[in-house]
């Protein structure tokens, strides 16, 4: 590519007053004059924040990227964007995913950047950065922060999924607060994101499956020196991508999305994968529907034996060969000939992969589980669909189930009723939670895997059918129907369910049915009053007015698509 064509020349290549201004202030950072003479400018989009502990090592990681960029003849410039930490942000980091994506999009477009490296880690930081970059569509490579080392507590391996087990044990008085406090430090003992196949690991696998990273990016632990090597090599590679003008839209084809869906099924990825992939597809202009997730992941068995669907951790996954092994095993069902960020095809990237631990990564002949993928159920209770992850079910008989509804009108009502010893509930009850959808909460929190009523836990019940318009943590498990669309807050049939109604879940036939007559539903609808959402100003008001439903990826309506890399006005 001719240097004159670099985007950054529109700033640093100018003569006279404008060029003076663009360069002079940059020189206060000590850059010599020849940096501005036509090197590709590589933005390093950094989600470092001490409030996002999963990304707390990103200053260091950015330095590794910079080394690679310098080596390859580029000019690296790091910039911060809004960072979304899953554990601290209230009410839910998902409320801000789209806001962060706007920050990313506008920061890239407004600045003299020819190519960008996205530093992603904690759950929402990956989709928000990729969504924003897609709407600009310049050469882009993703570097994930990597998972934490496996936690160790009293001689046992632990990870984020154990929080649910610890908390149920604590509720039942089986462990003390002191023991819980000890377990905290044991679980998070190194830098990095959640060590199981939760949403962050799912997102790291998603970007590798889409071809947006170097091979092996997904699983290298954050604390492993090879994580820095990956970042360093990604820094080198992005400079070549700029020279080749290899843009996101050339990598993110419909075929790449199909590959990602199949690979996600094989690793038992989080249900959040659905919502984020739909949003990314909407930004890059690929036609993807909820139904695609169902039919593309059907027939794909679970190959990765990782918590919460299996038994091992991301560290084990890396030592067993990581994602390239899964991709190689699935190759006959994938589009192997499509291009990825390193300029090689999917097939070329995995051909040398080798499995070093068949306990951790199975084969098509000997999978970890047959039952896998993400299932989309529909019916009068979810006209636009809802999502369920069968491999996370603790009681597979519940995948075909008919039971009496126990309704929680919202999350506060649920908390109020849960500990009630007189609650009319048994193990066949279907728990229904309303008003935790994209608009209703707002922000669609991860509360769908509701804790079970105490009196049932005490009887040893471990799983029940639960239905909501919310999401579930990627580390969660159970027979949980999520993302019901349309949500209750906009008058979906979910809003009309009452205690005692019969609900039928039939996963085999992809059906979710509320057994109430149309006449009765019409009568209830006539008495239904829309939820008073009550946010008159600010970003939350913007979100409520523009967020789309879960089956559309919960992006904002005006953010779909892209505006390219040309700045809105260029008066200089
Ligand atoms: Fe950040 Fe789990 S909390 S990845």
Image: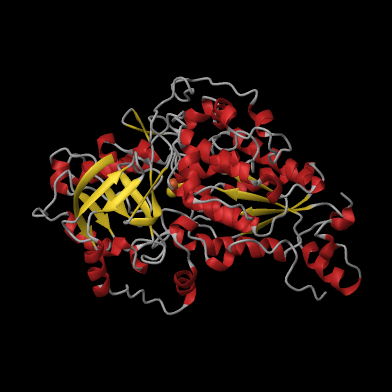
Residue 325, by quadrant, is top right
- Residue 93 visible in the snapshot: no
Residue 274 rendering spot, x and y as whole percentages: 47, 48
Q: Which residue appears at 38% of the width and 38% of the height?
A: 159
Residue extending farthest to the bottom is 536
Residue 55 rendering spot, x and y as whole percentages: 53, 49
Residue extending farthest to the right is 15
Residue 134 rendering spot, x and y as whole percentages: 64, 55
Q: Is residue 81 left or right of residue 474?
A: right
Q: Which residue appears at 65% of the width and 46% of the height?
A: 253
- Is residue 535 positioned above or below 484 on the image? below
Q: Nearer the viewer, residue 520 or 171?
A: 520
Residue 47, by quadrant, is bottom right
- Is residue 450 positioned above or below 295 on the image? below
Is the image coloured rainbow, by chain, by secondary structure, or in one colour? secondary structure
Q: Which residue appears at 57% of the width and 38% of the height?
A: 259
- Residue 237 visible in the snapshot: yes
Q: What number of labels is visible?
A: 0
Q: Nearer the viewer, residue 1 or 118?
A: 1
Q: Which residue appears at 66% of the width and 29% of the height?
A: 347
Q: Is residue 274 left or right of residue 74?
A: left
Q: Nearer the viewer, residue 277 or 92?
A: 277
Q: Is residue 151 left or right of residue 280?
A: left
Quarter of the image where the C terminus is located: bottom right
Residue 546 rendering spot, x and y as whole percentages: 49, 70
Q: Is residue 26 left or right of residue 255?
A: right
């Amino acid at each position: 590519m001719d240097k004159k064509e670099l985007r950054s020349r529109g700033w640093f290549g100018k003569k006279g007053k404008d060029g003076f201004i663009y360069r002079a202030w940059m020189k206060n950072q000590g850059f010599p004059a020849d940096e501005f003479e036509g090197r590709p400018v590589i933005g390093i989009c950094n989600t470092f924040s001490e409030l996002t502990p999963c990304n707390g090592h990103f200053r260091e990681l950015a330095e590794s990227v910079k080394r690679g960029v310098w080596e390859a003849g580029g000019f690296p410039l790091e910039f911060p964007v809004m960072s979304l930490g899953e554990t601290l942000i209230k009410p839910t980091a998902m409320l801000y995913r789209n806001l962060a994506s706007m920050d990313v999009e506008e920061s890239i477009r407004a600045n003299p950047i020819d190519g960008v490296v996205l530093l992603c880690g904690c759950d929402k930081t990956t989709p928000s950065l990729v969504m924003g970059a897609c709407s600009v569509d310049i050469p882009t490579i993703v570097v994930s922060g990597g998972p934490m080392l496996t936690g160790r507590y009293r001689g046992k391996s632990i990870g984020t999924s154990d929080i649910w087990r610890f908390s149920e044990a604590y509720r039942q008085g089986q462990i003390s607060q002191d023991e819980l406090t000890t377990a905290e430090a044991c679980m998070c003992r190194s830098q990095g994101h959640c060590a199981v196949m939760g949403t962050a690991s799912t997102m790291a696998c998603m970007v590798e499956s889409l071809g947006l990273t170097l091979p092996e990016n997904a699983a290298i632990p954050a604390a492993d020196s090879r994580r820095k090597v990956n970042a360093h090599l990604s820094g080198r590679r992005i400079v070549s991508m700029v020279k080749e003008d290899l843009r996101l839209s050339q990598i993110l084809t419909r075929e790449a999305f199909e590959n990602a869906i199949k690979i996600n099924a094989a690793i038992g990825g989080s249900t959040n994968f659905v919502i984020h992939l739909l949003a990314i597809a909407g930004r890059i202009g690929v036609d993807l529907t909820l139904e695609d997730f169902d039919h593309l992941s059907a027939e794909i068995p679970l190959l990765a034996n990782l918590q919460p669907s299996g038994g091992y951790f991301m560290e084990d996954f890396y030592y067993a060969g990581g994602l390239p092994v899964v991709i190689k095993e699935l190759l006959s069902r994938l589009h192997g000939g499509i291009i990825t960020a390193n300029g090689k095809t999917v097939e070329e990237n995995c051909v040398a992969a080798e499995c070093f631990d068949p306990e951790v990564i199975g084969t098509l002949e000997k999978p970890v589980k047959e039952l896998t993928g993400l299932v989309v159920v529909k019916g009068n209770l979810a006209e636009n669909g809802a999502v369920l992850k069968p491999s996370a079910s603790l009681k597979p008989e519940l995948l075909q189930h008919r039971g009496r509804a126990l309704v929680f009108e919202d999350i506060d009502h649920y908390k109020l009723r849960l500990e009630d010893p007189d609650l009319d509930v048994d193990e066949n009850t279907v728990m229904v939670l309303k008003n935790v959808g994209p608009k209703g909460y707002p922000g669609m929190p991860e509360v769908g895997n509701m804790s079970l009523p105490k009196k049932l836990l005490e009887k040893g019940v471990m799983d029940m059918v639960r239905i909501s318009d919310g999401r579930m943590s990627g580390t969660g498990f159970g027979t949980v129907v999520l993302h019901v669309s349309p949500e209750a807050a906009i008058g979906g049939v979910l809003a009309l369910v009452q205690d005692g109604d019969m609900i039928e879940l039939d996963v085999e036939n992809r059906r979710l049915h509320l057994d109430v007559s149309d006449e009765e539903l019409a009568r209830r609808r006539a008495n239904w009053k829309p939820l008073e959402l009550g946010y008159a100003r600010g970003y939350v008001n913007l979100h409520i007015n523009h967020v789309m439903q879960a089956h559309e990826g919960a992006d904002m309506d005006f953010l779909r698509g892209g505006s390219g890399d040309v700045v809105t006005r260029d008066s200089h």
